[in-house]
Image: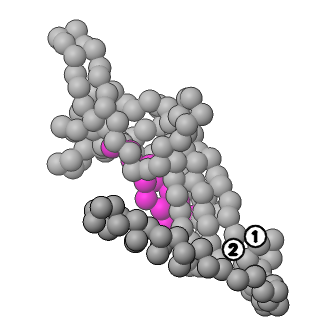
Amino acid sequence: MKKFLFLIIPMLAALLLGSCRGDEGPMGPMGPAGPAGLDGKDAEGFKSWALTFTVEQNDWEAITDTDEPYFRCVFENVNELDNSVLGNNALLTVYRLLDDDYNATLPITKLHKETKDDGDVFYTQLIDYEFAPGAIRFYVTNSDFYMDDKPETMDFKVVVHYY
């Protein structure tokens, strides 16, 4: 019986004390309006836009005059990436657009298998980017610096957010 009371008394106390609630009072006054220009329409507020880039397989340049060779493709004269954008707390997010309507945020690492006459070659591929005013560069670096074949054609989407 003591165990029963030990369990019942706390439950009854919680029920009685937790369920006491009076009538709800009237709604308070509306608060002040938020700051103007943050709806994406005002020229002084938050802005966002996107560009797409296609790097064809033949566009990949092999950079081999280094201890760590890689492939690179440079897009210059990207007027949208000017100092007025990049100097305003810009955030760049770059996606690789995949064939099945999925996107992968860079940098990404993918596993590859190449079948050669002398056997299969397994390697990972790091896909990355850099940007500067007026330009963006895409990179592909293979593990063990495998450079036999140029990377496949790749589509990228660059999304820029800034104030």
Residue 55 percent location from the top left of the image:
52, 39
In front of the other: 86 or 6: 6
* Residue 86 appears in view: no
Disc 1 crowd, CA 10 A, few/some/many (<14, 14-19, 20+) = few
Q: Which residue is mark 2?
A: 46
The dominant secondary structure in magenta is strand
Q: Secondary structure at mark 2?
A: loop
* Type of amino acid at the residue the image marks with label 1: Gly
Q: Which is nearer the eye, 83 or 61?
A: 83
Secondary element at tag 1? loop
The amino acid type of the residue labelled 2 equals: Phe
Above or below residue 130? Residue 82 is below
Q: Is residue 125 left or right of residue 135?
A: left
The residue wearing badge 1 is 40
Q: Residue at x 47, y 70 (%)?
A: 12
At 43% from the left and 54% from the top, the residue drawn is 129
- Which stretch did the figure color magenta? 126-139
Residue 99: image location, x then y, percent:
55, 29
**Residue 160: quadrant of the picture:** bottom right
Q: Residue furthest top?
A: 117
Question: Viewed as shown, does residue 97 lie left or right of 79?
Answer: left
Residue drawn at (40%, 65%), measured in percent from left and top?
8
Image coords of residue 83 (percent x, y): 58, 75
Residue 5: image location, x then y, percent: 35, 66
Badge 2 crowding class, 10 Å Cα cut-off, few under 14, some 14 to 19, many 20 or more, is some
Q: Quadrant of residue 19?
A: bottom right
Whether tag 2 and tag 1 are in contact, CB under 8 A, the answer is yes
User: As rendered, which of 114 and 59 lies closer to the eye?
Assistant: 114
